[in-house]
Image: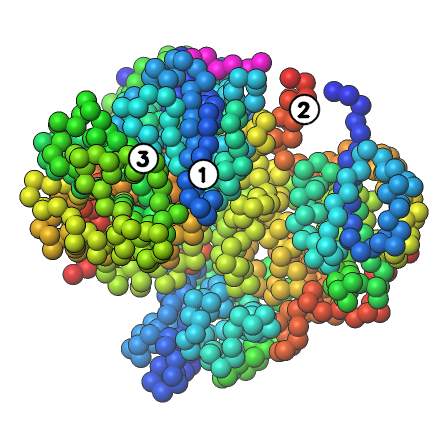
Amino acid sequence: MTKKIDKTDINAFLGSLLQDYALYAPAREAKYVTFREIHAPEEIVWDCLVTREPPKDVFLPQTEVLFSYIRGADGVVVQSNEAVERERIVWGMRPCDAQALLVQDAVFDTAENRDVYYANKRAKTTVVGIGCNQPLSTCFCTAVDGGPFKKDGFDLFLTDLGDAYLSEALTGKGEKLLASPFFHASRKADEKAAQALEKAALEHLPEAMDVKTIQKHLDELVASPFWDEVQASCIGCGVCTLLCPVCHCFDIVDEGTAACGQRVRNWDTCQYCVYTLEASGHNPRPAGRERVRQRLMHKFDYYLVNQGVLGCVGCGRCVQLCPVNLDIRQIVDEIGAAK
Amino acid sequence: MREYTEAIRQEARRLLTDGGVQAVIGFAEGTLPMRTAPFFARKVEEAERLIWGPYCENNLARYLREWKGKKVAIVAKGCDTRSIVALMAEHQLMRDQVAIIGVPCEGMLDRRIVARRVPGEVLSTRQEGQDVIVEGLRFSVRLPRRELLYRSCATCLHPNPVLSDVLLGEPVAIWNEDPYAYVREMESKPAQERAAYFASEAGRCIRCYACRQVCPMCYCEECFVDHTTPRWIESGVTPAGLQGWQIGRAYHLTGRCVDCGACERACPEEIDLVYLNGKLNKDVRELYGFETGVQVDELPPLAVFLPEEGPDFRIR
Amino acid sequence: MSEWQPKIVVFLCQWSLKSDREWEQRFELPSEVRVVEVPCSGRVNPLLVMSALQHGADGVLMVGCEPGHCHYKDGNYLGRRKYATLESFLQYLGLEKERVQVALMGETEGSRFHVLVQGLLDRVRGLGPAGALAVRQPLACAAQTEQG
Amino acid sequence: MIRAKQAVKASNPYLPVPMRIENTHIETDDNMLKTFELAFVHEQDAARFQFVPGQFCEVSVFGKGEAPFGIASSPTQPGPLKFTVNKAGVLTSTLHSMGEGEFVGLRGPLGNGYPLKTYEGHNVVVIGGGFAFTTLRSLTEYMLDKRNRARFGEVSVIYGARTPGLLLYKEQLAAWEQRADAHVHLTIDVAVPGWEKLVGFVPDIVAKVAPSSKDTYAVICGPPVMIKFTLPKLTALGFKPEQIYTSLERRMKCGIGKCGRCNIGPYYVCKDGPVFSYAQLAGLPQEY
């Protein structure tokens, strides 16, 4: 079902949503725009394509209490923190971040060993997307199976038509939002306009990469000196991975004493030297070479094997934010060209 | 800037041919506007990729630890050379293992300031006299260079290399005399306001440790934040965990930080890190007359003392 | 919750007050004070001070030997620079000046030590619970066990 | 008191069940290895726990976290689960200081375990070194159990340690040595007075005493250096990569293939392993 909502009505509509939902959207924080919970529609920054932090925190908080424990007479009693009370809406997610969400679904929302913390939040969340009329120079979604107007993963999808948002419901959750009287009927011309916007946006974006060749080359490059070259400037920080909308690795730690405390999970990254360090002192990935290789191989090889999807969605955050301008697009090009 | 690029390449060619160095650590063209990338020229022909410009923002001394035991050359601004001196003082580096190509620095431009002062994505910039022309899809804006400097550059006292084997070009004049004005401003605020500011800055940290990883002086084999016995701070992005990290990180650089600002530039959350280390730098300067990495062979201030100096903790 | 009682942590060099060890008998320290004896004040990791504050200490006192009287020659001199900068830094971050104190004392100053501790305790009482810097979260669960 | 609902427990893979330490036993004369016998506090948790040799559990030491340990007891043995723990880090040191009657948590069984169906009808040679003998003990016990023995061909055990005092499960080994239907070869690195069994490094002993590769699977666990030198010996004996199995160790957190740190190539050691054949590992990064 497709309708539209006038921009003059949008804040009133969002205001009405705040009664029933916790709302997450691109909003200002310090000097930049990030994805966070908002409390007034005016906080939303509409023209930010790539938020500093991706919205993954909504489903996989950087620090999350899994359970609390307390020592009792007959053992240790644990109380899980998995329940999610409030319905949520993620407003204004971009197609790349939604594609990342689908990858995380494949990791966490599995038939066996379902991650209830993630799945419960996902079930309680309505995801509203918006197309990207003018992609940035760092965007490369089209190279990695995505697109600036791709609707996969959304419940409701908006297209900015200038004075209104064309709004397409893709699921029951989306239709529920669309039932609001703020939306009115759209016309054929609106859909035409949306198509024109998509066509224009695509002109700024690169061609699809040859995933098969890259995957094959990666398998062949495992022992190659190629990685020594690639990793030379890498400083081993966690910017590229922590701010990646796909990366989902975490650490599990106890905070507290033997008598009582909390078991907490925190984002972790394969780029840290202590990530794979064992208590014995042995480290199976001892240097930058192995760690940089792991990041690339996980994204462009292992995800394809295990989840059937790429682990890179082309949002360009790592490209923008790497302290030493180590550009994943360039590395992937080099892998593709490697002989 | 072009002249510097040429001079750097020439010197790199010479060093790689008969200078006995395994690599020249410098900057290459970046993949984005306003960016350069640290680059390691190992062969003579790779010297052609070295460049110099207003976006050579990394402190390359950070890479020297990865070349330990091998002789390398490094393209170094004032702050990079200060780090080299500081590393030598801590016995992390031997003078004869590094050939320093010193470059006087006019201050690096803050890509984030530039981005915020124009109405769209920056696609290119160029310098015209004392101005920078910034261009995007539908705009071209002229901005005064002086307003675009990183704060650490705007307050820099040592833009010229303090130590070098070859110094390119002419030393630049120092444009600043009051490096810690921003620290004094913070000191003058009420304690509650200072606490609130620290809490909000530290609160944005995502513990990516980019600040640590880019820092030439953060060379600990195991950082206190990764210790398991004891576990010094809380593991998560909790207020105590984040403040603990920032306090520990900054304080461990007492008398060791060279004010290069590399940590702040690396921070993806744009946390004010310089105001933390600036305070410690100001204190060691005022209390002990010490400036990190300026005097070769000077011991770090926390490794020495004068018996008669203050503060006199007896009378309180 | 019962009425708030301040928590004071004292890092005490094992050599300072050495000849006056009976201070322990002569003056019973208030129960709010926890003394951590250390081999030398000069080697106390500043992270321990931070850690004490993050674990809920409302005041910290560092006691070392008088200038010229370090058992290891110059530990107290080295420590002096460390604590001067640390104190100043913590204040800069918003911690009240009165909460962290450094004292270099002679071997026989047991009574002065007692006065010092009492003074710190009184000042901290006046200030109330420390709130400028964040404390670790699972502290909340300690209260939980006490109740349960 | 707070009490988790049973229904929640069953569906949340991160929640440990409480276990009581029934017994502890120091295994080696350097006091670094200790076996913990853990009993389920709740009957229903015990009933749900079905495992095969080679699987592992995440053991919680509350306040210190969780770590994975292979199950050293065999599913054929009733009673508490056995875990042998090397004192290495914070968690294991704390665990070593704990004793009878204290509580830990348990998640599991995790991982794939040894492919018993594959081994059935064939000879199996178990090769172990040092303290990497825990799940090998479980496997050997399982195969030698009278209900299972007929399903396997010849069972050989080659186990070495630096000194006699560093061999694990001495009583068990002695019992196996008594059996006519098992070949047990114990070795130490350097001869010491009183030791009358084999002397020499495991790779060399394998070359001497290992059975023919015909119809035989080799299962090898030990320090990386032992494995490195033993593999060529097995190859020389005609073992193909698909006939050689190992159980890998990696740092783990979730144990269910989500936290990401234990992968070797596309495999997660926790979920797809820890047991792999060398045919599976061929061509992957040697990150173990």
Q: Amino acid at mark 2?
A: Ala
Segment tinted magenta in the rendering: D1-6
Q: Amino acid at mark 1?
A: Ile
Q: Residue D199 magenta-drawn?
A: no
Mark 3 — residue? Answer: D172
Query: What is the C-alpha distance between the residues marked 1 and 2?
Result: 37 Å
Q: Chain of mark 3?
A: D
* Left or right: where B175 falls relative to D219: right
Mark 1 — residue? Answer: D26
- Taking the spot 11% from the left edge, 55% from the top edge, the residue there is D236
- Taking the spot 42% from the left edge, 35% from the top edge, the residue there is D35
Q: Chain of mark 1?
A: D
Mark 3, other Cα within 10 Å: few <14 / some 14–19 / many ≥20: few
Q: Secondary structure at mark 2?
A: helix
Residue D44 in view = yes
Callout 1 and callout 3 share a chain? yes
Q: Which mark is residue D106?
A: none
Residue most toward the front? D194
Q: What percent of the width, then of the height, locates residue C46?
A: 68, 52
Mark 2 — residue? Answer: C143
In this orientation, which residue lies closer to the viewer: D79 or B156? D79
Q: What percent of the width, then of the height, locates residue B313?
A: 85, 57
Q: Quadrant of residue D256?
A: top left
